[in-house]
Structure formats: C-alpha cells, structure tokens
Amino acid sequence: MTVIHEATMDNIDALITGNPVLVIDFWAPWCGPCRSFAPIFESAAADHPAIAFAKANTEAEQQLGAYFQIRSIPTLMIFREQILIYSQAGALPRAALDELLGKVMALDMDKVREEIQASQQQAQQ
C-alpha cells in the first residue's frame, strides 16, 4: 500500500529529517492543475517505494506554505538528505516526474554539499 504523508507545520521537520528523499506536493482543493496532478503524484509514489511522498494542503496549512514561500500551486519540492534539491511550480507530466526523480536519486550528494559549502564561503567574502 502506498503511503502519502500529509505535511503539516507540526511534522515537516520530521518528514525532512526522517526520509533520505522526500517529495512534497503543495496544493489546494480549489486548484484545477493540482487536482489534475494528484493522480500522477499518487502513481509515482506507488512506483517509487524508496522515496517518501507528502502532500501539503496550502489552504489548511497556510503557515507551512508561507514558511516555504509558496507563491503558486501546484509546487513540487524535493529534499534529499535534508537538502532542498528541487523547487518549482507547475504540474509535471508523469514521464517528466519520473525523469526528475531519477536525476535526484543519481545525484552525488558529497559533491552537492561541497558546492553548497563553496557557495556559502563565497557569499561570506
């Protein structure tokens, strides 16, 4: 059985820290593109059991939406090893979502951390 977590302000930290990879769909019940994307998201969750999936209802969780500066929906965010790897508004076709998940899983996270550290050091100079 596929589990899609409900992301809330109360559990977001645990979801991010407790899962090596977390995909969050920020949505709202009144949003047509969000409703169209929902079956794609649910199907991807079923086909990628090694990845955690969560949905954040921006109407019910306005504080969470504000925390992540969600300006349009649907917005997809992907965290890997507690690092935000991807954040973009817009519904994706299934093939594009699968390709994106493949790229996220193929990332060399040591290299990603090195690039983040180098960028932070540059910003401090």
Image: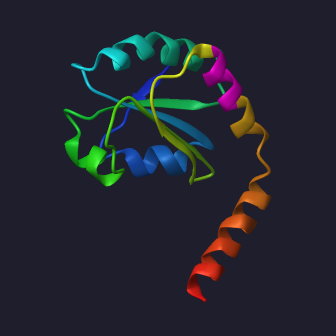
Q: Is residue 115 visible?
A: yes
Q: Position of residue 70 (x, y in %)?
A: 33, 44
Query: Which residues are the magenta region?
Result: 95-101
Q: Is residue 14 above or below residue 49?
A: below
Seen at 42% across and 52% down, the residue is: 13
Q: Position of residue 57 (x, y in %)?
A: 28, 30
Find residue 34 and report its horizontal and vertical position in percent: 36, 20
Q: How is the image coloured?
A: rainbow
Q: What secondary structure predominates along the stretch shown in magenta? A: helix
Q: Is residue 48 visible in the rendered structure shown here?
A: no
Q: Is residue 5 left or right of residue 79?
A: left
Q: Does the magenta segment cover residue 106?
A: no
* Image position, residue 117 (x, y; %): 67, 73
Determine the residue positioned at 67% across, 30% down. 101
- Residue closest to the eye, 31 or 83: 31
- Image-quadrant location for residue 19: top right
Q: Which is more toward the observer, 91 or 29?
A: 91
- Residue at (55% x, 32% y) in the render: 52
- Picture quadrant of residue 4: top left
Residue 75 sits above or below residue 44 on the image: below
